[in-house]
Amino acid sequence: MAALPAAADARLGIWLAVIASAGFSLKAILAKLAYPYGVDPVTLVALRMLLSAPVFIVVAWREAARGEPLTARDWSTVVVLGLFGYYGASMLDFYGLLYISAGLERLVLFTYPTLTLLIGWLAQGRRITPREIVASLLCYGGIALAVVHDIEVSGEAATIALGCVLVFGSALSFAIYLTGAAAPIRKLGATRFSALATLVSTVAVGLHFAAVRPLDALAQPAPVWWLALAMALFATVLPVFLQSAAIRRMGAQTAALVGSTGPVITVFLAWWLLAEPVSGMQMAGTVLVIAGVLWVGRR
């Protein structure tokens, strides 16, 4: 009889991971909906982080009461990785969304597993297996098809190239974060580390905003505030904690594989909410990227 609750718990984990993937996918859609109101990426990221910060403050305070105090080394690690994982990755991603479609953005961003492999090879001497090489080729082949689709739709190759470079930089920044996060997560716990890293990013975004924008830039139209609030709740806070809950139920690898639904969800949402055209070439590219991520994730 014990197997039944375990199976039900695993099924719940799958649904939590799918919902988390949908939440993360929603970020690009909400950003695209906000840009026509004239908000710039720095201000939009600042609104997103400021609105989500109270939740992460409460979580960090609660987890600190349960755990040991952080050493100076712990703090330096959290600061550096927070700057890469949530500040650098977010800024580059939101700027990239100015130039490319939401569907292409998600595909390019989804290269971070293959970039994590490359960083492991360069920094740690980890051997890359033939399976992982094939998976990487599938991912980048799929992105190439999606790029061709966007160029055919917009006819602006240079603009699309710039957007892809920015989002690829975001994926690289997030891959650096993932590579370095394993050790502090083991020591601090995933929830505490994620909350602290997010708060570090919030401070960095706030300083960036203060350096380049006047305070009255926060006086955005009501739709921008509502979209930023939705981004904070449904594309930041809830996905982070739902993903953590999914990982507790079925492990990080399985949760990551279920998260491969992200590009498909983004393409569908972009077609539904943004009227972005969908072609057979784009769907083929999406299938190749997902196949590459699934292939690299297999044991």
Image (cartoon, rainbow, N blue to C red):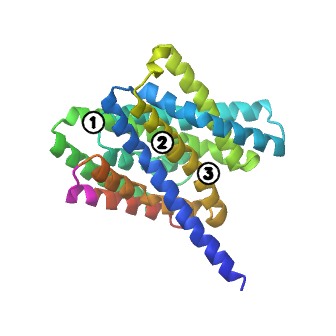
Q: Is residue 81 visible?
A: no
Check disc 2 and report the residue beneath it.
230
Say what amino acid the circle numbered 1 marks.
Ala
Most common SS among magenta residues: helix
The structure residue drawn at horizontal position 61% and vertical position 71%, both measured from the top left corner, is 10
Q: Earlier in the sequence, mark 1 or mark 3?
A: 1
Residue 30, numbered circle: none
Q: Quadrant of the N terminus?
A: bottom right
Residue at the spot 50% in from the left edge and 38% down from the top edge = 229
Query: In the drawing, does residue 274 fall left or right of residue 47?
Result: left
Amino acid identity at mark 3: Phe
- Image coordinates of residue 124 in percent, x first then y, are 60, 45
Q: Against 15, is 40 above or below?
A: above
Q: Nearer the viewer, residue 7 or 79?
A: 7
Q: Quadrant of residue 207?
A: top right
Q: Secondary structure at mark 1?
A: helix
Q: Which residue is mark 3?
A: 241
Q: Which is nearer the eye, 296 or 18?
A: 18
Q: Which numbered disc covers residue 161?
A: 1
Q: List the single residue furthest toward the bottom.
A: 1
Q: Secondary structure at mark 3?
A: helix
Magenta segment boundaries in residue numbering? 277-284
Mark closest to the chain's N terminus, 2 or 1 = 1
Going by the image, does 201 lie left or right of 229? right
What is the x, y in percent for residue 277? 21, 51
State how far apart marks 1 and 3 are (Cα).
34 Å
Residue type at the position of mark 2: Ala
Image height of 68 relative to 41, above or below: below
- Name the side, left or right, on which 8 lies relative to 68: left
33 drawn magenta: no
